[in-house]
Structures are given as structure tokens and as C-alpha cells.
Amino acid sequence: MGSHALDLITIGNNFGTAEMRALWDDKARIQKQLDTEAALSQAEGQLGIIPVDAAAKIKEAANVDLYDIEDIAAESARLRHSLMGTINALERQSGEAGEFVHFGATTQDIVDTGMMLQLRDAYDIIERDVAIVLDLLAKLAKTHQDTVMIGRTHGMHALPTTFGFKVAVWVDEFIRHAERLKESRDRIFVGNMNGAVGTYASFGPKGSQLEAATMDILGLNTPNIGWQSARDRFSEFGNIAALISGTAGKIGNEFYNLMRTDIGEIEEPFSKGEIGSSTMPHKRNPALFEGLASLTPPVLKSVALLHESMGTEHERDAMHWRQEWVALPEIAIYLSGQLNTLKNVLDGLTVREDRMQANLNRQAGLIMSEKVMFELSDSLGKQTAHAKVYSLAMQSFEEGLDFGDVLKDDAEISANHQPEEIDQWLDPSAYTGLAHEKVDQVLAAYQAFKAGLADGK
């Protein structure tokens, strides 16, 4: 049984996915540390630092299924050391070769590199899910490229836009997120194997070769210099995760608002038998949208905590280091929950075009005041036209009159413009600017990005 929200079996899936949680549990953590110990031994065997047969035995013993995790945990607690329980267990399992376990390494070499391996697996899931979300967003933008709706600024009706245009803005954001993930991968996934203060003293003159050989086995990049006191790689991941989470949370909040009873322009996927309220049987609450938006604040707070680790003192300390153990799993798991929810939402979203049309007409033509002003500016001048349309718009609003009727009743306007012309000015579908073209532009950029991925660029 867990105590953190992530681990509670009753609500844990509200905060992350089982797939991502599995990458950060005790078994996964220890296995990545064992993988690092095995790679170190293999590299040392290749370079003649330890016997080759000892390296082979250590590699064979580096399988978490051979160990009792609770025993390792108990020994670690007794020794008050986060890694010694694992080192001792590997040493015993390796028999005589155990003398060469952890040869020349320091704890942070193993823990940092093991955590990089965990993060790389998490990164793969995030990158995969971002790609799926991007594809779903692109399809939604194309489907509703010309679905006219009211645009809102400051929470109020502003001008017509299209739902496809709204979604295309998110597509463009997610393209940048995908680019960030791609561009940062080589910079982030760098291991560390250089001894107690990073100088390779314990490895001798072959230290740099040993580190490179170890990282090659693990599929990680080799650092220019030890980074035990330089934690920016983890922080860079945190920054990217925060940006992705921010967009996901914004989408969740936007959908939450558009689903309000008084707006009703979209609806989240609803399953037969789903309960919206324990007391009001009629309720169909935006539970998925709320969950999507709710996870951005914990991601941002965990990223802030992660940045604290950059203040490492001297060559190494545990005060800052341990904050990563808390923050990295939380960031990855919360973000996995958001992306998973977003995939489900986009795959089953109901778009209520009838409600979008109804909301366009709620202010009886007032949303077209800008269009009317520009039409009149040719004959009146822009500032004069603005003052006139403002006065007529306020009359329409305050007296509850149809804006078209007010315009047609104005002597100056009716003297120069026919009622049919005024009706044309008030058509929202004719005043969406370059929304259609901009959706095309974003979707073309997305296709170019996908083509670049396929070409390995």
C-alpha cells in the first residue's frame, strides 16, 4: 500500500500511468544501477583493469530478479547508505568476482548514470506520447478548419475565429515541444564514471577510456568532464517537461471552460455508467479536463525543486542531489498522466457545432462591430467610424436591440448602405481573416517536421 498519491491504488491512475510508474519503482531503480555496475565491469575487463572472467560473472549477477529488494532495503537502512546494500548484494552474488564489483567507482557515478538510464526510458514514453498527441491535434485542426466559433478575449466575446485555428495554435506549440525533445536528447543523456571527485584518480591513466567504454555499453554519451556538481542536464529535462505540461494544462482548462453548461461547445468522452456526481444524477462533469489541467501545477512545483539541485556545493553533496530523487519521478509520472489523458480526450472529443453557432449569435451581431467600423471608415474615416459604431453598439447592448436593426435605423448609414449590404457585414463566417490559410500553414509545418523525423534529420 502506498502513501503518496502516485502510489495509491484507488487514485494513482489520476496522477500518472502504470507504464511510467514502473520505470521509477525500486525494481527499475536497482536494475539500472546493476546495469551500470555491469557496464563498468565489462569496460574494465576490456581495458585489462579487472579480469575478463570476473567482468563476465558480475554481468551475469546484475539481474534484479536474483535479489530480494526488501533485504537490500533493510541493509541500506542499516548502513545508512543508499547504494551499499545493492553493492554488497551484487558482490555476494558474483562469488569470487565480487572483489571487483564497483571497482574504482563512487556512489554518485552509479546512481547518476542509473538515473539517466531511467530518465531515458521515461523520455522515450514522453516523446512517443507527444507524437501521438500531435497527430490527434493535427487531425482535429483539419477537421474543424472552417468550423466558425466565437473568439474570446478577457473571457468575453471578441471576434469570430474557427475551432481549427484554435487547435492549430496548440499544434504549433506541440511541434516546438517535439523539436525540443529531439534536439535535447544527445545533450541530456550523458553518463558519469569518473570517481570520487571526478578526476579519474581511482581508475588511473585509462580513466577517460574506461568512462567512454562504459557509456558506449550503456548507449549514453560521454561527458567532456565529470558532472557530479553540474546538474543542468536534469534541469533541462525539467524545463522541457514544464513547457509540455503547461500546454497540456492550458488545453485542459480551455476545454473545461468550453464544456461549461452555459457555453457547451465541446464535451469530453463520456462512458455509459460513468458517474458525474454522488448526489446529482444529471451531472456529466468535465472530470478528464479537470484532471488534465490539475497536473500542471505539481509538475511546475517539482521542476522548481529540481532546479534547486543546481546549487550543489563543492564537488558533491547529498543535500541537493536527493531532491532529484523526489522531483524526477514526479515530473515524469505527472506528465505521463497528462499526455495519456490528452490522448484519450482528443480521440473522443465531441465538438458541438450547433452550440458554437448559437454562441456566435448570442450578442445579436455585436461581435461584428469591428467589421462594420472598417466598412464605414472608407466614407467616414476610421476614428469617426469608431466613435459612431461605438455609440450604436452601446445602444444595442444597453437596450437589448439587434445590432443589425440599430445600424439600419441610423439615418447616415441607411442613406449610403442597403440592408442587404449591412446583413453581409454581420456574417461571422465571412470575417475569420486568414484562419483557414494559417491552419494550412501549421499543418504543412507539421508534415515537414514528420518528414524530417523519417529522414533522420
Image (cartoon, rainbow, N blue to C red):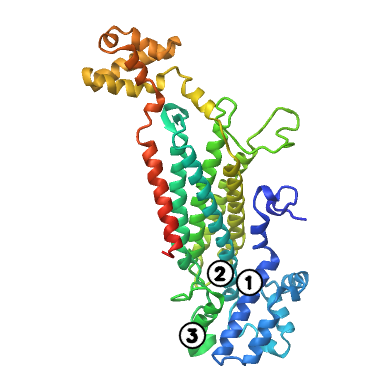
**Amino acid tagged 3:** Gln
State the residue in front, 145 or 374: 145
Query: What's the CA distance linking mark 1 and mark 3?
Result: 22 Å
Residue that mark 3 sits on: 209
Q: Residues within 10 Å of mark 2 (few under 14, many from 20)?
A: some
Circle number at residue 32? 1
Pinpoint residue 397: horizontal percent, then vertical percent: 43, 14
Residue that mark 2 sits on: 317
Instruction: Answer whether labels 1 and 3 touch (C-beta < 8 Å).
Output: no
**Amino acid tagged 2:** Asp
Quarter of the image with the C terminus in it: bottom left
Q: Is residue 3 left or right of residue 105?
A: right
Instruction: Answer above or below: position of 430 versus 18.
Output: above
Instruction: Answer above or below: position of 142 versus 399.
Output: below
- Residue at (24, 22) in percent of width and height: 382
State the residue in front, 377 or 197: 377
